[in-house]
Amino acid sequence: MTNAPTPPLHDEKNPDPWRALLLDRSTFIGEDVKTALMRNNASRSRQFLLPIVRPLARLTIGITQLLRIILPRRMTSPRALHAIICWGMKTFVSRDANYLILRHFNIGSQILGFLNRNLAAGALPAHPLMPRQIADVGNNTFIQHDLNIYNFIINLNDYLRGNQKTISALPLEKIDFSPIRPFDHDFESLPDKWHNFLDLQSAIELYTPMFGLLLSDDDFWRASNSLQLDETIATYVAQLFGRPEILSVVNNRHPMIPLSTFEAGFRLMLHGYDAENLYGFINAMKESAGHDDAALQAISGY
């Protein structure tokens, strides 16, 4: 991603909230990601469209949930869902939002691969998702992303129980960081025309009711509940490094107490934020372990 233009001088009587967050280094989120997210937050789409889209989307979710009570598995089409998402990403979604969406699947696969390598010696089955262009997302990526998280947790804990092991902190020099590697430069050019105006939050709010409409009741509930597994994955990372403080940056919590699907769109944004923080933390630990990697030069101040 290209860096944002140099911001104007700071006006103490009217400070820019997005500039404050862009300059802040209290989190582990990389500079390119923060730049894209803050441009997204400052967009007119998010300012004027999101307040209209969000209540309508939640109303639609309620209607689809009622429909699924009567027809829990009928009239579903994951293929159509992914086709609509890809069309929307190419046609309406902004370049920054598309960048963050593609990036999310890559970092999710790298985090699971990292845990697999260090907690189970790479013995767990995996289905990594590494989309490099929007068309790659059409291959059932959203559903497979949720399946990967659930399958990883089940397979990991079966492995630990079967081998009578527990997760304990490893010395930093013994942790294998090889699954964590840069990938942004592999992305193909993303659409950035006049009609690519839709911000990430508005896009997610618009897509979420389609998940309820085009997925079975089981698939939609599983997808919604998977968002709270951020706490579970972060706990594994915290235990591996012996650094429980990383849990303080996790916002989707308490997976044993599922939340309503009405807030799925907002919690999906938190899911992306949690994943970026966790990925940035692992990268910071990689840097601390002396692994010299060009992608880590942007990570500093931790």
Image (cartoon, rainbow, N blue to C red):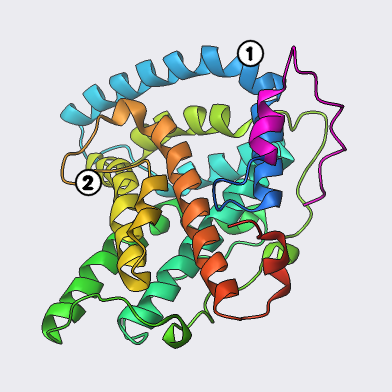
Residue at point 20%, 38% (across, down): 258
Q: Tell me which numbered mark, 2 or 1, is placed earlier along the sequence.
A: 1
Q: Amino acid at mark 2?
A: Pro
Relative vertical location of residue 152 with respect to residue 227 in this rendering, above or below: below
263 over 121 or under it: above or below: above
Quadrant housing the C terminus: bottom right
Q: Residue at x 55, y 53 (%)?
A: 28
Spot occupied by residue 260 in the image (x, y as percentages of width and height)? 25, 29
Q: Residues within 10 Å of mark 1 (few under 14, many from 20)?
A: few
The one nearer the camera, 168 or 179, is 168
Foreground: 284 or 257?
A: 284
Residue drawn at (70%, 62%), measured in percent from left and top? 184
Q: CA distance from mark 2 to mark 1?
A: 33 Å
Examine the image and state in which quarter residue 195 appears.
Answer: top right
Disc assigned to residue 31: none
Which residue is tagged 1?
48
Count of numbered labels shown in the rendering: 2
In this rendering, position of residue 291 left or right of residue 195: left
Instruction: Establish if 162 lies above or below 281.
Output: below
Number of the label disc, if any, that sits on residue 255: 2
Range shown magenta: 1-23
Would you say residue 101 sits in the magenta stretch? no
